[in-house]
Amino acid sequence: MSMIKPWKLISLLFILQLLAGCESKLEQTQKTITQQVLTTEQSIDRLGSAIETGSIRNARLLSEYAQVLKQQKPELTRIANLIAEDATRKGPLYENLAMRLNDVRAETVTLDNAGLLLDELTRINEASKQSLFNDALTDPINVLADMSDGQLARVGAISQYAEQSSGDGTDYGAGSQMVGNPNYGNWQSGSNGTSFWQWYGMYRMLGDLTGRVGYSNWSQNRRYSYYNDYGRSRYTSPKQSVKQAAVETKTRKSFQRKGQSFSSPYAKTRSGSAGLSRSSYTPTKTTSSYSKPKKSFTSTNKASSKTGSFRNSGSRTSRGVSRGK
């Protein structure tokens, strides 16, 4: 047996040290993400408890608005009950937070996707804050307010009369605050290649009020809504963000082929907010941005052979739901 030359032994030890360093960094990253998952799960559970105990002011108000509207317009009972679900744990706004956490928990952690996972956890954690969730509920509240023909006042936004008097944007009717929000629907391509808003499930009832909303027109003429102007970064999953970017890119190319200019529907914040919490005006502190999405973290987990997983850690926060993940 030949002796190993000293320089080869030194090289081997150096390589082993490098590998050990990489593994140590991965293990540290796994621990950080696992801890953040637990912290985020606790935040979601605290929010759910606050909703159930009536500690979220706008959740109580949403339920009250639904009751008033049903008495005023019994024919809108089904849609009022549906929108009022956001005042509970069963509403899409709350359930989507739990679904997104489950998506993160199911991921295999790599050094490539760790930053994206941490960013998503940060967004979910912030979206679970009571002050921000309270603000997010202003959209469904204002949908009910607009259905009441002025009997119910808008919350967190200027009045319907003031908005119409300003002459800005297009009036798509009651329910327009939810257009563009992937918790309630998504953009679909029509037979002519243009995109239009398609409501999920029973939310299709809102289509009778808004009519057919095309992306090209909406993106240039939409009015204020909490989600589209302040809540999108926190209440949108990476998958949903990628889909939004794809529709925008497709529409921009269509405009360019016609020699027309196109501006992103999120290029500027629409005026119309009133009395939101300070947190809504504060940007999320993450390392990446939904305004320029690359890939969702689910598309990066095959890129590295150095992986770790916490698939089975912790308990599931929510039952599986297929809505707009």
Image: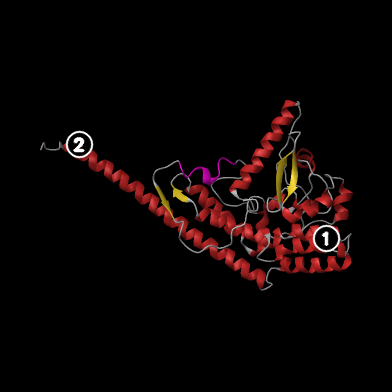
Instruction: Check the image and report above or below for 247 versus 276.
Output: above
Q: Are marks 2 and 1 in contact (CB under 8 Å)?
A: no
The residue at which mark 2 appears reads as: 8
Identify the residue shown where x is 80% and y is 53%: 206
- 185 or 234: which is nearer to us? 185
Residue 59 location, x and y as percent? 72, 66
The residue at which mark 1 appears reads as: 145
- Where disc 1 sits, the SS reads helix
Residue 13 location, x and y as percent? 23, 43
Identify the residue shown where x is 88% and y is 66%: 72
Q: Is residue 296 left or right of residue 302?
A: right
Q: What residue type is labelled 1?
A: Ala
Identify the residue shown where x is 65% and y is 51%: 324
Q: In which quarter of the image is residue 46?
A: bottom right
Residue 128 location, x and y as percent? 61, 61
Instruction: Check the image and report above or below for 48 versus 168.
Output: below
Q: What residue type is labelled 2?
A: Lys
Instruction: Check the image and report above or below for 304 versus 107.
Output: above
Q: Answer whether residue 17 is magenta in the image.
A: no
Q: In this view, does 304 lie to the left or right of 153?
A: left
